Image (cartoon, rainbow, N blue to C red):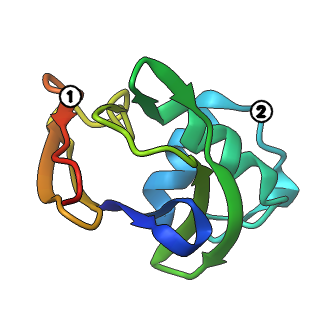
Amino acid sequence: MSSMEYIPGEKGYKITVRMYSDDLLLDLVNMYEIKDEHIDDNVYCGPDDIYEDYINERLKFVADGQQYKARLEESEKLEIETVMRLFIECHEEINTLDIHNTILKGIYPDQVNLFIYKDDTNEMALRFTAAYSREQLELKAAD
C-alpha cells in the first residue's frame, strides 16, 4: 500500500510506501545485486539509499508532463513490514498527475497495489494490478 499527500507548508508531497519485508527483498534481489551480508532472515538490512532507487523505478510520478523523483527521508525495517517515507518537492499547483505503479509486478502476476492520493481538494483510492499499472488523475483546483 502506498499513499501520496500534499503538504502545503512543505510545498511538496509526502509519499509513504508499506511493503511486506520478504516481498520487498525478492524485488530488490531481482533488480539489484544484493550482497548476502545485507540480508538477515528474509529482510533487507543494507544501506537505505537502495530504497530511493527502487521507489523511483517502480513508482513514477509525472505532474503536468514533468517527471518528479522522490527523495527518501526515512525507512523502518521491521520483521514483517518495511515502511519507506519519501518526499517530492513540487512548488506549483498541479492539474494532472500520471502515476505508474509497478511494485512487485514482475514477481506476482496477481499483484494488487493500493494507492491513496490526497491534497486540499482531492482524495481518491486507486488500485493498480499487473495488467493496470498506470492512472492519470485530473485534479480539481482549490477554491
Residue at numbered disc 2: 33
Q: Disc 2 or disc 1, which is closer to the eye?
A: 1
The image position of residue 21, as x and y in percent, is 50, 66
Q: Please give the name of the residue rendered at 68% of the width and 47% of the height, measured from the top-left corner.
A: 52
Left or right placement of residue 52 versus residue 78 in this view:
right
Say what secondary structure mark 2 lies in: loop
Asked whether 59 or 91 is in front, the reply is: 91
**Relative to 13, is 127 above or below?**
above
For label 1, the crowd category at 10 Å Cα-Cα, with few meaning under 14, some 14 to 19 and many 20 or more, is: few
For label 2, the crowd category at 10 Å Cα-Cα, with few meaning under 14, some 14 to 19 and many 20 or more, is: few
Left or right placement of residue 123 versus residue 28 in this view:
left
The image position of residue 141, as x and y in percent, is 22, 49
Say what secondary structure mark 1 lies in: strand
Q: Quadrant of residue 31?
A: top right
Instruction: Report the number of numbered marks.
Output: 2
Q: Which quadrant holds the N terminus? A: bottom left
Residue at numbered disc 1: 136
Q: Please give the name of the residue rendered at 61% of the width and 46% of the height, measured from the top-left corner.
A: 70
Res. 71 mark = none
Asked whether 124 or 131 is in front, the reply is: 124
Q: Which quadrant holds the C terminus? A: bottom left
- Given the image, on which type of amino acid does mark 1 rest? Gln
**Relative to 128, is 66 above or below?**
above
Disc 2 to disc 1, C-alpha distance: 33 Å
Q: Is residue 8 visible?
A: yes
Q: Please give the name of the residue rendered at 60% of the width and 69% of the height, measured from the top-left corner.
A: 10
Q: Please give the name of the residue rendered at 47% of the width and 69% of the height, measured from the top-left corner.
A: 7
- Given the image, on which type of amino acid does mark 2 rest? Glu
Asked whether 40 or 134 is in front, the reply is: 134
